[in-house]
Image: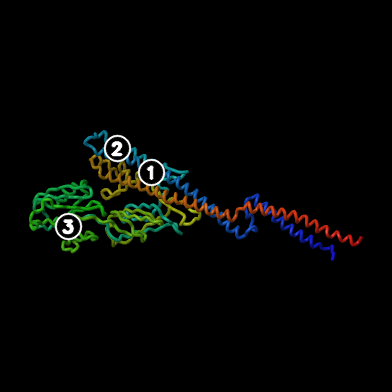
Amino acid sequence: MSRINTNISSVVAQSRLGRTQQELNMRLERLSTGIRINRGRDDPAGLIIAERLRADVAGVNQGIANAERASAVIATTEAALAEVNDLLNSIKALIVESANSGAASSAERDANQLQIDSAIDSITRISNTASFGGLKLLDGSRDYTLSGVAGSAMTRARVFNANFVNSTNLAVEVDVLASAQQGNLFLNGDITPVPGQITSAMTLEIRGPKGVSVISIASGQPLGNLVTAVNNLTSLTGITAELINGNPNSGLVFKSSDYGANAFVSVTRVDKPQNPADDNWQLFRFADGVPMPAADPFDWADTNLLRAERDTGQNVTALVNGNLATGDGLRVSVNSPTLGVELLLNELFATLPDADASTFTITGGGALFQLGPEVTAQQQVSIGIGSVAASNLGGTLVAGSVEFLSSLKRGGTNSIDASLRRNDFTAASEILDRAIDEITVSRGRLGAFERNVLVTNVRSLQSALENLSASTSLIRDADFALETSSLTRAQILASSGTTVLGLANQQSQQVLQLLG
């Protein structure tokens, strides 16, 4: 049968040719862009996955850039701290030189003091001027801000890192579990036949963390004279003495100047009598972990008292936000991903484990570094970079108050220059050593952060970038071998489709032969 109103062959040929043309256009587009998925209809599921991977790649790329910039900031900060270290070392040399007063004139020592003052001013200047891209690095603006630090509990608080998870501040609770202790040896003052006096001449060897000295005591001397003799040598031994409850009849206590496991006191009678029964010189210590009681009168019948000639101090033990802190004398420190803090506890608070816990709040601050592709707490690191101004370095307890590096300047606030002129370099040396330790530890912390966090983070992200890019390419990029093959096929089909369409159109004209 022959019909001309509807040319089915032509319709079919047009449909097939249209599809072939679409495929041809798609192959040309993929080859011209190099991308397999140019729009959603090309591969809807693949588009979703590919765009997610592209977002991950963008985040990883920026994370790498962030880490590299953070590394530059840390390197700049550490370089400035290295200069502070050099200045502190020069001050150390000047103080040691000045201590050689037997071979240095007062004019030389005054010149040294001028150099010390200049170096201290330079340290403060570095603190105020060190910067990176307009960001001040060492003036304290990168440090954490604290609120509610009770002076009755903590003499000083330094925060190295804090993680504010879903909060704008972080509460820090400090609870003393076991007291800090000095090394203590007790001498009973009720010595027969005369209480409160040395009954026979003796020679004592006093040994402490700083060294050893020998004291000779004449017979009949009151215990108060022994206290004076021991305290006159404190700078050589690190040992002090005091009457128990201020009463010579109660006896006296030899104690280390410092607290902690490194502090000890040893008192030995050198000229012990051959017959132990003739020796009424008896020293006692309390059993480990038992603090010195505050009872008056002193209870010599206490079962915790043990015969001894040596006693060692004890580090404070405390919980910081439920974590067991590392104790060092009166200092406690915690270093965790959520909180890194070092606290110098008040002497009374650190020796009273039954006292209520003390709490302060970290209200903000710190330097926050975004190191991962996602803005989450797990991919952020916050560290504190404190001020290194002379008024903030070397905090050390001196005569009951905290002194800083600035006190080494002549005429400054709480200046200890007068002590230097009296040839007493102990306090200055302790402050300086503490300042050197603080700067050195800060450099070590920054170096560890750069090496163990930033560098490893960049390596990890670079590995992730390689894998993510490969996955994205596998899904999204065009396979040129496949696309050129498909293009050739489409071109052939388009050519043949055009020919077939022409034949289909000619087929209707054959009806005219029936009318001939």
Looking at the rendered structure, which numbered label has been put on residue 184?
Answer: none
Q: Nearer the viewer, residue 320 or 355?
A: 320
Instruction: Report how far apart the C-alphas of labels 2 and 1 lie in the structure.
Output: 23 Å
**In the image, residue 158 lies at what x, y percent?**
36, 52
Most foreground residue, 299 or 379: 379
Instruction: Give SS at disc 1.
Output: helix
The image shows residue 42 at horizontal and vertical percentages of 64, 57
| 3 vs 1, front mark | 3
Q: Please indicate whether residue 42 sits to the left or right of residue 324 in the image.
A: right
Say what amino acid the circle numbered 2 marks.
Answer: Gln
Image coordinates of residue 132 in percent, x first then y, are 45, 43
Which residue is nearer to you in this view: 368 or 277?
A: 277
Which residue is situated farthest in the right direction here? 516
Mark 2 secondary-structure assignment: helix
- Identify residue for label 2: 113
The image quadrant of residue 197 is: bottom left
In the picture of the structure, the residue carrying the numbered disc 3 is: 308
Identify the residue at horizontal 69%, vertical 52% (top origin): 488
